[in-house]
Amino acid sequence: MPDLPEFIQYLYEEYRSLDSGSLASYIPELTKVNPNWFAISIITKEGEVFEVGDISENFTIQSISKVFVFGMALEDCGRQILLEKIGVEPTGDPFNSVIRLDENSKRPDNPMVNAGAIATAGLIKGSNPTDKLNRMLDMFRRYIGHDVYIDAPVFMSERATGHRNRALANLLLNFGIIDRNIEEILDLYFQQCSIVVNCHDLAVMAATLANRGINPINQDKAIEPCYVRDILSVMYTCGMYNYAGEWAYKVGIPAKSGVSGGIIAVIPDRAGIAVYSPLIDHRGNSIRGIKVFEALSEEFQLHLLDFPLEQCPFLDISHRDPIRRL
Ligand code: GLU
């Protein structure tokens, strides 16, 4: 089994020349990043950090925010209310699809697609829009370990071009999932997507989930530990757009990606991993990101459902224990 720092350096060299995919352009402002940026960060629950590449380059968090706002809504409203409003079924549809919401369920399938995330934003408590936003920023600060801010041009760009999201919000109002303050809810959703992070920040956030809600760097509690299970469940089944099934099968770790090119993954009780590379495939997943995670999972046997090797006579038990080494 390779040494972890050497292996991520190898992955960085191996995949940095992979330039297939494209920048998300349906939000015009997202095209203003360097397509070559590439970073890998792994942070253990003990706070050990392994990273390589463009770790400090900033980008907007986009859909990865859905994971954390879902956790916040769980704390604000509890499981029962959330389940009444938003399901936990994978869709197999594109993240911004309108069709199933209208045809089938009349409620969003899960909180990781846009319809579900907009409904989730509508559940965030606060006395007025500023209060809700400040509570949300504070939640992200606890996960990341420093103050966070919103990229105003990206927010304005999303707000100006987010017609599908507006359509979803109108359908959600029609089905009684959100109230009449559509523009206010959409603004909160666009703001959460426009929060600025870097690859290191994402790994700290993932490591916080791996560490049952306690930030492993500063020991701040980011979320009630009882809700981490809920978050990881929907990440595992719904986190990678309409690639979630294949990801669960091949990589086998709860994960979430965003159209700006980030992917986070959580190895419960072990480590958080983040990869950033803004060239994405037609589903919205970072192409280099998927390659890196496939290789990491394979090499360090990270698949959560891997057959216990003790029971498998064909495999050498000494190869086990990779996650503990992280
Ligand atoms: N803000 C983006 C949207 O709503 C997020 C998309 C994503 O990262 O999946 O379209």
Image (tube, grey):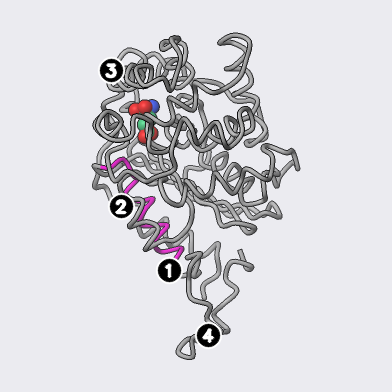
Residue at position x 49%, y 28% in the image: 120
Mark 1 to mark 2: distance in Å? 21 Å
The residue labelled by disc 4 is: 311
The residue closer to the viewer here, 128 or 299, is 128
Residue type pointed to by label 2: Ser
Task: Count all numbered tags in the image, as a single digit.
Answer: 4
The residue wearing badge 1 is: 298
Question: Of discs 1 and 2, which sits in the foreground?
Answer: 1
Which residue was labeled with disc 3?
Answer: 163
Left or right of 227: which side holds 61?
left
- Provide the secondary structure element on which disc 2 rests: loop
Mark 3 lies within 8 Å of ligand 1 (Cβ measured): no
* Prevailing SS of the magenta stretch: helix
First to last magenta residue range: 283-297
Residue extending farthest to the bottom is: 313
Residue plotted at (48% across, 34% down): 66
- Say what secondary structure mark 1 lies in: helix
